[in-house]
Image: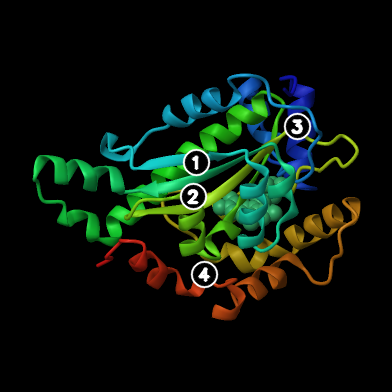
Amino acid sequence: MTQATTANLQKLLKERYGNHPPALNLINETIATLLDHRSVRSYTNQPLPAQTLETLVAAAQSAATSSNLQVWSVVAVQDQGRKDRLAALAGNQAHISACPLFLVWIADLSRLQTLGDKNQKAYDGLDYFEMMMVATIDSALAAQNAAVAAESLGLGTVYIGGIRNKPEEVAQELGLPARSFATFGMCVGYPDPALPTGIKPRLPQASVLHHEQYDASVHAKIIADYNASMETFSVEQGMKTSQPWELQSLHRVRGPEALSGRDRLVAALNKLGFDMK
Ligand SMILES: Cc1cc2nc3c(=O)[nH]c(=O)nc-3n(C[C@H](O)[C@H](O)[C@H](O)COP(=O)(O)O)c2cc1C
């Protein structure tokens, strides 16, 4: 856990925002843990303490949930063969095989379908995109609570959106019922100190924080500083920097071919028992 001091806050803000940190002085252990986040993709062999999984799930279940519907679930994967197969399905991401615990967060409308069948009640509302949104938002809020809890215990995590590359195969591997869908995975393990990861800079607050009304004119103006912060970070981390952040990001959305198979997500969801309207 990060020590919550004003000096530490200034260090964390400098790392998070590069040369233009906001002038802030509110700090406590929770805020320090949040500001200290970095994705971790290398782990030691140290096993997780007993009850880690159940503690992370208690944190996840403490997140707010739309209308208290709780339309999410999580599948905890520790079997090496299953982690290896999921790693392959998610684009050969070796950290899935390497982590001691792989959590797959499920947007889960199947529970309400089951309860509807049991009570012989209609559940036509489940077919609308709105409910897919609700389930996806619920699973993301739950997962982020678990991630923060893990980090507060000295563990590292990384989300795995690659789990959406092949939704039907993932659903089969996890035995998911109809109307449930793996939104993303999350590797959990103790960070390998031999391969430390830095705090990745974020956009200046002026790019994301608007007062009263959205100011679209800011985006083009202030991006140069952020490109520079990301370039510095990439050099420090020994990563290849072929082009500025804004061009890398645009490359990622250039067309359906850049979506790693997820351009067919709506078709896949409908095959998994959703019938989105
Ligand atoms: C929903 C989601 C999906 C992600 N998918 C992957 C992934 O498949 N593989 C991976 O290595 N990182 C993945 N990431 C991690 C992001 O790349 C990372 O959060 C981002 O670059 C910011 O870096 P940081 O988390 O270290 O601050 C994902 C993050 C999120 C929120």
Q: Is residue 50 visible?
A: yes
Query: Is disc 2 in contact with disc 1, using a CB cutoff of under 8 Å?
Result: yes
- CA distance separating discs 1 and 4: 21 Å
Which residue in the protein does label 4 denote?
Answer: 262
Relative depth, front residue between 100 and 254: 100
Which residue in the protein does label 1 denote?
Answer: 75
Horizontal relation, residue 224 to residue 85: left or right = right
Relative depth, front residue between 244 and 113: 113
Q: Indicate the quadrant where residue 150 lies.
A: top right
Q: Is residue 255 visible?
A: no
Q: Earlier in the sequence, mark 4 or mark 2?
A: 2
Query: Is disc 1 in contact with disc 3, using a CB cutoff of under 8 Å?
Result: no
- CA distance separating discs 2 and 1: 8 Å
Q: Residues within 10 Å of mark 3 (few under 14, many from 20)?
A: many
Whether 133 is drawn above or below 262: the answer is above
Which residue in the protein does label 3 denote?
Answer: 190
Q: Earlier in the sequence, mark 3 or mark 2?
A: 2
Q: Indicate the quadrant where residue 186 lies.
A: top right
Residue 194 in percent (x, y) is at 91, 38
Horizontal relation, residue 214 to residue 102: left or right = left
Whether 28 is drawn above or below 44: the answer is above
Furthest-front residue in view? Answer: 81
Q: Earlier in the sequence, mark 1 or mark 4?
A: 1
Question: Which amino acid, by three-letter code, is at mark 2?
Answer: Leu
Q: Residues within 10 Å of mark 2 (few under 14, many from 20)?
A: some
Q: Earlier in the sequence, mark 1 or mark 3?
A: 1
Question: Which amino acid, by three-letter code, is at mark 4?
Answer: Arg
